Image (tube, rainbow, N blue to C red):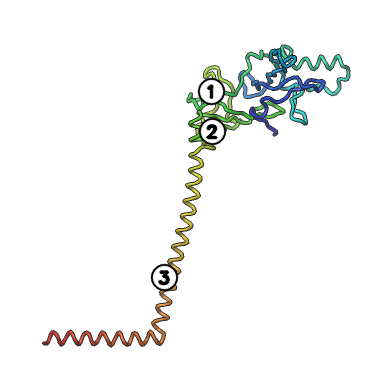
Amino acid sequence: MATVSLRQIYRCQVVDQNREVIGTVDDVLFHPRDPLAVGFSVKPFRVGGVVPLPKRYLSFHRSAFDSDGRLEVVLDEDITDEKKATKEANAAWGTKAERELGFLWDDTIIYYGQAVFIESGAHLGKVSDARFDIESGTINGIQVTAGTAADAALGKRTIPGKSVLGFSLEHYGILVDDSAAEIPFEGGVAESAGKATAVATDAAQKVTETAVKGIAKATVYTERAVQQAANSPAGKKARGWLSSFAENVKEAMKDEENG
C-alpha cells in the first residue's frame, strides 16, 4: 500500500486538466468522523504574483499524483470532448464536489495539530504528522507529539491506522483506542540513552566474561606450571633442600627448649 505523509504533501504543486500548475496543497482534509482523507485545500498562485485568490477545495477521489509527484485532476479516459472534459474537471472542485461527498468542506477535519485522546479520555498529545493511502485515503498511522520538551526527552509516538478511530465531537479531537497509550516513544534522549546503556552493558558483560575466562585459563596454566616446575630436576632439588631446612629448624628449636 503506497502512502504519503502530511509533511510530504504540504506545498505540493497542483495541476489542472490542462496540465497547468495552478497552485499548491495547503492542507489535507479528512472525513468529519472517519479516519479517511477526502480532499485537499489548494492555495492558488497570486494573480500577477500580487493579488491573492481564495482557497479552492479539491476532491480526493477525483485527483491523483502524477509521475512528477504533482497532484492532478483525474478525468475519465473515455471523455474526448473538450466541453465534457471541462465539466468533469469542474466536478472535482468546490460545491460540486461537496454534493458528491455528502457534506460541506467546512465540516472536514485538518488532522495536523489536532488533540489526540484515548477512548477512556486521557490526552496523549497532538498530531504532528499522519500517513494515508494515496489511492483510498485510509489513514495508515499518525505521529503524536506531547510538546517540544517531551519530544526531546522521550520522543514521539507513532499510532498505527488500525488504532485510529477518527474525529470525536465529544472529545473534540482525534480518538484512538486505549492500546495507543502503551505504544513506546521513539527518537528521544531517553531512547538513545537506553540504547547506549544497553550497548555499554553488553560490552561490559563481554569484557567481564573474557576477563573471567582469562583468569580461569591463567589459573589452569599456573597450576600446570607449578606442577611442571615441581617435577623438574631443579624443583626436586629445591624440595629436598626445603625438607632438609625444615628438619634443621625443628632440631634447633628442640635444642633451645632442652637448654
Q: CA distance from mark 2 to mark 1?
A: 14 Å
163, above or below 239, in the image: above
Res. 156 mark: 2
Q: Which residue is mark 1?
A: 115
Give neighbour class at mark 3: few <14, some 14-19, many 20+ (Cα, 10 Å): few
Towards the viewer: 99 or 147: 147
102, above or below 217, in the image: above
Give neighbour class at mark 1: few <14, some 14-19, many 20+ (Cα, 10 Å): many
Label 2 residue SS: strand
Q: Quadrant of residue 101?
A: top right
Image quadrant containing the C terminus: bottom left
Give the amino acid type for the residue marked by disc 1 in the picture.
Ala
Q: Along the polypeptide, which appears first: circle 1 or circle 3?
A: 1
- 232 sits to left or right of 173: left
Q: Residue, x 66% and y 13% (percent of image)?
A: 104
221, above or below 62, in the image: below
Q: Residue, x 50% and y 46% (percent of image)?
A: 196
Image quadrant containing the N terminus: top right
Res. 219 mark: 3
Give the amino acid type for the residue marked by disc 3 in the picture.
Thr
Q: CA distance from mark 2 to mark 3?
A: 52 Å
